[in-house]
Every structure is written in C-alpha cells, then in structure tokens.
C-alpha cells in the first residue's frame, strides 16, 4: 500500500523547501492541517491575536532574514484582516506568502462558512494570487507562489486552499514536491554593461555627485558593494528605508541632514532602489540641471514620474560593484577632486545638527520629542534593531536616529501603515534572538495592534518598547488645525491618557511611566536589564510637531 500525504503536510514540505522555519498565524478550522504538517517538518507556529499582525510579522521576517515570510490565516474575515499586512508588503517590496483558507470545493458557490472571493480581492496587491485546485498540486503551487515573489522587485503572493483540498490525502508519488534549491533561478541581474560604462563615465566627470541608498540595497544584501562604491569614488551617501545603516554613523561618507542641499547643488544624483514617490516629491526635489541615474530591480519604477539621464535595471550590489570597478580603472575617476564637495556638505550637516541640538538636550516638561529620540539614538548599540511605528513621533526619529549596522532599521515603508511595530519586533526577535530589538511607537500606532504584546510575553520574545505618548494622533491634528482652525483641531484625533507602562505589567511584561527627560535613559536601561517585553511610556509635549508634519510633506 503506497504512502499517502495530506494537503496540509504538502504545504509544510513546500515551506521547508523554501527555508521557512516559522509561520505566523491565527487559528481557524479551515487551516489546522497546515499546523499538523508544520509540527512534522519542525516549523515553528507563532499564533497571534489579530491576522494583521500575522501578515506584518511575515513581512518583517522577510526583511530581517532575506528569506520569504509566511502567514497562515483562515477564510473570510481571517483573510480580510490580513489584507493590510499584504498591502504594506506590496508597497514595501517585501517577499512573503499569505495562505488563506477557503470553503470546500464541494461547496463552491453554495454559501459555505466564511466564503469570500479572496483571490479577486488579493490580486491587485500581490505579485501572484491563486486557488489551489487539487491536493496533488499543493506543494507545486506553493513553490510557484514563492517563485513569483522574486520576479523583478520582491513582493507578496497569496494562495487560498479549500478545506477539502487541504484535508484530503493522496498517494505521495502523485504529488509534485519540488526539491529545495531546484525550482527557482537566480534573480540577480548585473544590468546592461553599456549602461554601467555610461555610469562610470558620468562619475568620472562629476564634480558634485551624491548617491541615495534605498531599501533595495538591503534587499539585495548589497552593503559591501555600496560601501566600496562610495569610498573608492569619494561619493557622499544618503540612506533611506531599509538602506539606513549601510554606512555607520561617523563614517566620512555618511550624510543625513544635508540631503535637500545636496539634491539642489549636485551635478550627478544616483538613486538606488527608491521610487520617485511622495517621499522624493515625485522626483521634483532633485536639481533640474543635475544628471540623474536610477538603479532599480523593477523596470516599471525606472523613469516613473520624472525623466532620467540613465536607468539601469538589476541587482544594486552587482551594478554598484561593476560601476566602481569600471570607474576606478580610469586614470582620472574624479575621486580626488571631490574633497571640497564633501567638506561643503559636512559644513551644512554640522550647522543643521548644531541648530537642533538644544532641543535634543532640552529639559522641558512635557518632554520635547527631540529629546526622546535623541536618548534612543544614544542608547542604540551595534546590535540593536530599531523599529519605527507611528506618525509624528517617528517623523522626529527619522531625523535623529541612526542605526549602527546594516539591516537594523525597520519602518512600514511607503504605505505608511500604523500598527507594524509589534509584529516587526516579534519577527525580528524570533529570527535574530542574538539581537536587541527596540521599537518606538506613537500611542495611536500602538493602540492598533498592542494586544500582541501578550504574544511577545507568551513566546518569551523580549524587546524594548518605547511609546511617545501625546494622547493624540498628532500628525493629523496639526493638519486639521492648519486647515480648519484650533477650535476644530481635535475632531477625531484625540486619545485617552493611557498608562501603557501599567498595560505592559498587566500582560506580564516590564513597564514604566516617564515624565522627566532625565529619566528616559535610566528607564531604557532598566527595560534592557529586565529581559522581558517592555513598554516605557514617555509623555511627550502634544503641542510640538516634527518639521515634516508641519510642512505636510507626505501630502505634497
């Protein structure tokens, strides 16, 4: 008698073949056979309290590990709850697979429990969405979904698996089970060689070049190539998204506060792995006279929203390494004459820092948000993964916090999703238990997914949570005040004065309330020493706003 295998166990085998060692889930009757398979395959099952958290955690796992993340949710509301996490991964170019349950094929269109057209709903926000039609095809289509995650720029895939397909058993020889490492080709493209030569030529003639290292630098694990590029060619570097930390703070080529000046004065601007979206003013913030080069994994992103002088599609690391080699081989590559340009930018950088420093050291009460993010920045180590989850408070942190190592910065990405913090902390700590994880929340952002603090306690995933608490959704409040006046500034954006430190204790973690700025650092140290999931609730001034909030740059 031949050996048989169920659909859920085929899912687990396919996940194992892809290197997935954990799934994030919230249980449902449609999907329990996957759990049974995961137990047999040694895949950890982390069950959360909301499916949005499961999907965000799968996204976060992918960012930290470089492997695709996986979330498993039940049909209907389980899948719709996860939509936000999938959409966030889609805009952030994060490879993950969401598996959703579905009513049995034998009940198709009969009105089964939690039946919805999941594939139709997921198609616009995934790179691949499909129904698994038979048990024999389960592992095959899971591997297909993973393959599609890496077509061009990475992104999410979605599969729905009907309950009778998951539960049925078939002879194992009839099921196609792709072999690990033998169903996906390398997706690393080195770029058009002629275009790389043109980039080398532009570099050789540039007097004032600069480069923006975006999230794809980390996606491509191109840190070493990027560092070699900026150092060998003496090019000032700015970093955004997951690209932050590519160069350590204090590196002579690491710049942060002079970006607007550089984009105005540069004669060559190289944009790596960053679209011309709202964060870049749709490309309008770049000098109209500068030569603009765009390097990206996705052909559709290159030249979108503004003209460019050169576009190269491919892997950031391979392209930067090839361009550095081509330019360095020239007798005159421009590196030596750029000393004054770097000094010019460093002066701008220093002036900006000195102007803001009094606020970063302010003893004011309520606490100036600049003081809070300054203390966090001083507290970070080379092994601290920093996560930002919020509006106004995270806008402050983007100006001040500098991760000390590559891959140690996490933010939602261009969808601007609040509520990612708990899930990202969960994934980061689960995947890298050797790392310290610190997450800065706005109190509004924390409220969305904060109950999964209990999941962190249950799975013994210690992290340092900091809440910048102004009892408001302050980024929106500022815009309302500016548009409608102070008498209508607090419509729909004011929260209760919640002692989140006590909430942490209630759920079995460590918590403190901080109102004196001198107590921020000691409280952070105590949270570090506690070895528990923690929340340091810092009461910040609700009448102080980040410059980006006051300029409403996110809407321009």
Image (cartoon, rainbow, N blue to C red):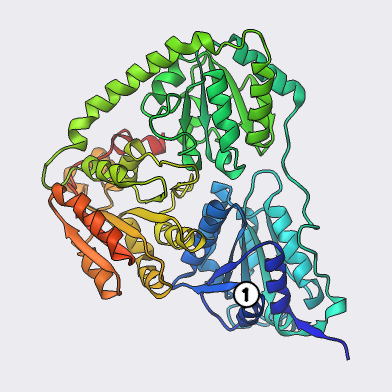
Image location (x, y in percent) of residue 506: 26, 75
The reply to whether residue 539 is in sight is no
* Front one among 488 and 228: 228
Residue drawn at (24%, 25%) of the image: 354
Residue 283 lies, with reference to residue 95, above or below; the image says above
Image location (x, y in percent) of residue 110: 68, 82
Q: Is residue 309 left or right of residue 375?
A: right
* Front one among 413 and 341: 341
Residue 429 lies, with reference to residue 113, above or below; the image says above
The reply to whether residue 276 is in sight is yes
Residue drawn at (71%, 48%) of the image: 151
Quarter of the figure that contains the N terminus: bottom right
Q: Is residue 10 left or right of residue 421?
A: right
Quarter of the figure that contains the C terminus: top left
Name the residue carrying label 1.
42
Image location (x, y in percent) of residue 446: 33, 60
In this view, the residue farthest toward the bottom is 1
- The number of discs equals 1
Residue 231 lies, with reference to residue 302, above or below; the image says above
* Front one among 525 and 497: 525
Name which quarter of the figure residue 312 lies in.
Answer: top right
Image location (x, y in percent) of residue 51: 49, 69
Q: Is residue 143 left or right of residue 68?
A: right
Residue drawn at (49%, 12%) of the image: 338
Name which quarter of the figure residue 451 lies in.
Answer: bottom left
Residue 113 lies, with reference to residue 496, above or below; the image says below
Q: Is residue 538 left or right of residue 407?
A: left
Label 1 sits on a secondary structure element that is loop
Dot 1: few (<14), some (14–19), or many (≥20) neighbours within 10 Å? few
């Amino acid at each position: 008698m031949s050996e048989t295998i169920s659909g859920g166990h085929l899912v687990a085998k396919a996940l194992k073949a892809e290197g997935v060692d954990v799934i994030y889930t919230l249980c449902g009757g449609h999907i329990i056979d996957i759990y049974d398979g995961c137990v047999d395959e040694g895949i950890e099952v982390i069950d959360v309290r909301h499916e949005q958290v499961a999907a965000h955690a799968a996204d976060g796992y992918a960012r930290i590990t470089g492997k695709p993340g996986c979330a498993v949710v039940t049909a209907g509301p389980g899948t719709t709850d996860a939509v936000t996490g999938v959409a966030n991964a889609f805009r952030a170019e994060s490879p993950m697979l969401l598996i959703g349950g579905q009513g049995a094929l034998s009940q198709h269109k009969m009105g089964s429990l939690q039946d919805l057209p999941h594939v139709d709903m997921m198609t616009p926000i995934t790179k691949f969405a499909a129904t698994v039609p038979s048990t024999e095809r389960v592992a095959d289509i899971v591997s297909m979904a993973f393959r599609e995650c890496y077509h061009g720029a990475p992104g999410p895939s979605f599969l729905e698996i009907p309950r009778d397909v998951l539960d049925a058993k078939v002879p194992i020889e009839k099921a196609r089970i792709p072999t690990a490492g033998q169903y996906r080709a390398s997706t690393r493209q080195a770029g058009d060689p002629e275009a790389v030569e043109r980039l080398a030529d532009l570099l050789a003639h540039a007097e004032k070049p600069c480069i923006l290292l975006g999230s794809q630098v980390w996606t491509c694990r191109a840190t070493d190539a990027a560092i070699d590029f900026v150092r060998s060619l003496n090019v000032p570097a700015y970093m955004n998204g997951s690209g932050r930390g590519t160069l350590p703070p204090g590196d002579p080529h690491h710049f942060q506060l002079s970006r607007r000046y550089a984009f105005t004065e540069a004669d060559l601007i190289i944009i790596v792995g960053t679209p011309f979206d709202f964060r870049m003013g749709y490309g309008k913030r770049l000098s109209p006279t500068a030569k603009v080069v765009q390097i990206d994994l996705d052909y559709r992103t290159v030249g979108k929203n503004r003209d460019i002088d050169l576009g190269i599609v491919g892997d950031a690391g391979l392209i930067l390494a090839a361009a550095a080699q081509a330019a360095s081989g020239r007798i005159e590559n421009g590196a030596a004459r750029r000393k004054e340009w770097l000094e010019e930018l460093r002066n701008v950088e220093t002036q900006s820092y000195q102007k803001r420093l009094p606020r970063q050291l302010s003893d004011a009460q309520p606490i100036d948000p600049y003081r809070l993010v300054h203390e966090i920045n001083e507290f970070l180590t080379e092994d601290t993964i920093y996560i930002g989850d919020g509006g106004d408070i995270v806008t402050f942190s983007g100006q001040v916090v500098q991760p000390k190592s590559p891959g140690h910065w996490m933010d939602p990405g261009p969808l601007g999703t609040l509520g990612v913090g708990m899930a990202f902390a969960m994934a980061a700590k689960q995947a890298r238990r050797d790392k310290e994880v610190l997450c800065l929340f706005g109190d509004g952002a924390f409220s969305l997914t904060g109950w999964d603090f209990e999941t962190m306690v249950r799975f013994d995933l210690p992290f340092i949570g900091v809440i910048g608490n102004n009892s408001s959704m302050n980024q929106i409040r500022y815009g309302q005040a500016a548009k409608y006046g102070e008498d209508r500034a607090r419509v729909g954006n004011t929260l209760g004065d919640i002692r989140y430190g006590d909430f942490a204790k209630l759920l079995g973690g460590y918590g403190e309330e901080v109102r004196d700025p001198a107590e921020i650092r000691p409280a952070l140290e105590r949270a570090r020493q506690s070895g528990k999931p923690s929340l340091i609730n810092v009461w910040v001034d609700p009448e102080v706003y980040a410059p980006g909030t006051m300029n409403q740059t996110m809407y321009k």
